[in-house]
Amino acid sequence: MAFSHISESLGIVHPICIERGHNAEVQDENGNRYIDFIGGIGVLNLGHGHPAVVEAVKAQVDKLMHSAFNAVPHRGYLQVAEALNDFVPVSFPLSCMLTNSGAEAAENALKVARAHTGRQGVIAFDDGFHGRTLSTLNLNGKVKPYKNRLGALPGPVYHLPFPSRDNAISCEDSMAALSRLLEVEIPADEVAVIIVEPVQGEGGFRLLDADFAAHLRTLCDQHGIVLIFDEIQSGFGRTGSRFAFSHLNVEPDLLLMGKSMAAGLPLAAVAGKAEIMNSLPIGGLGGTYSGNAVSCAAARTVMDLMTEENLRRWGENLETAIINAHRRWHDSERFPMLGQLTGIGAMRGIVLEDTANATGAEHLSALLKTAREQGLLLMPSGRKRNILRLLPPLTIEPEVLNDGLARLESALETLSS
């Protein structure tokens, strides 16, 4: 399918155009139906058109569509801030700013951290992803396709290896790299921020090593460094918990949120300790559309729906089905390219390995096409684009989930024949 008048710099994974969706199923303009394991790249944890969200949005449109909060406040923004204070599992009161996107949240987090510390240095991680704006680009832990042809980017930013049970990098490896960085490249008292994803999204659904997370927390406390957890993709129930940092038993100073926060409407946030969030002068934070009233109505409903009981039940159902399917496929030895399962809870990736006839990336590229032809939409990830990330809605019906996994198995069989 050709997309006229659209920049060719936008990478299109699936050359179709969908026109309607319901929970985990979508239909394109030609009437073809698909099971959606992409979910807007993690935006639709509650599925397409959750009825409670739709009802809240329609009711809000009838009352107030928008007011720029920093000009004339509206109650929806205030209610989201209050709800976040209860929803985010930290031991301190939250102060927040709502934004339009995750990248905007990351940009503003850098601003307040610089103002709070009086420093500029940033430490990020290999294979991390934090956005496509100029500052967030430099945080990203790979060059292609994000940093090509752009020259110098805002900094200084230093990268460390990301330690995880899902890769070959240990806690000790990253601790040694961090020690070297602070001895050779930049002193700790010039570092403003350490930013990390508790579970990498674009990087391949890799869970951060818990011991290393605790080490970061101790280091930041010792040297006055702001610790930022980017949960734009892993938050709002993706792992089966409200936020993935709960799996690490470490709290951030600032938390980045977005994607599923408003069930498909544009809304994100940076939230954290008030003494950090209040570091800029009045007027230093704001935005014309950020905290839009309709998006806020959706977000309030999302948080109402994401009770601990619901998240646990949804997460366990997804996790069990995916683990069992992967184990069955792996034990059968039918699929030579099938590698390990990454991630935690309902946030899972599958590594596709190199074989004698193709690389893992080539296998995944073929799998995306084959699965689409069989009515299943899938999404790649990883530095080498060889890790399949599975993002079905948490609310997916069991029969639809099983059907989607069966189509994935059929696509793997087609590639292996």
Image: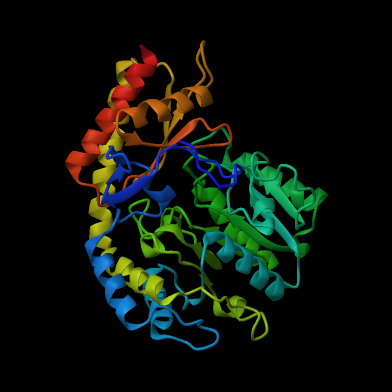
Instruction: Please state which of residues 207 and 81 is positioned toward the viewer in this rendering.
Output: 81
What residue is drawn where x is 55% and y is 79%?
A: 274
268 to the left or right of 212: left
202 to the left or right of 79: right
Residue at the extreme bottom of the image, as rendered: 72
Q: Is residue 316 above or below residue 113?
A: above
* Residue 162 appears in view: yes
Q: Quadrant of the N terminus?
A: top left
405 to the left or right of 335: left
What residue is drawn where x is 41% and y is 68%?
A: 88
Q: Is residue 290 above or below residue 4?
A: below
271 to the left or right of 36: right
Residue 101 locus on image (x, y percent): 52, 62
Residue 415 locus on image (x, y percent): 39, 17
Q: Is residue 270 above or below residue 13?
A: below
- Which of the 4 image quarters holds residue 142? top right
What residue is drawn where x is 26% and y is 60%?
A: 50
Q: Is residue 226 above or below residue 364?
A: below
Residue 222 locus on image (x, y percent): 66, 65
* Residue 251 appears in view: no
Residue at the extreme left of the image, as rendered: 399
What residue is drawn where x is 47% and y is 82%?
A: 67
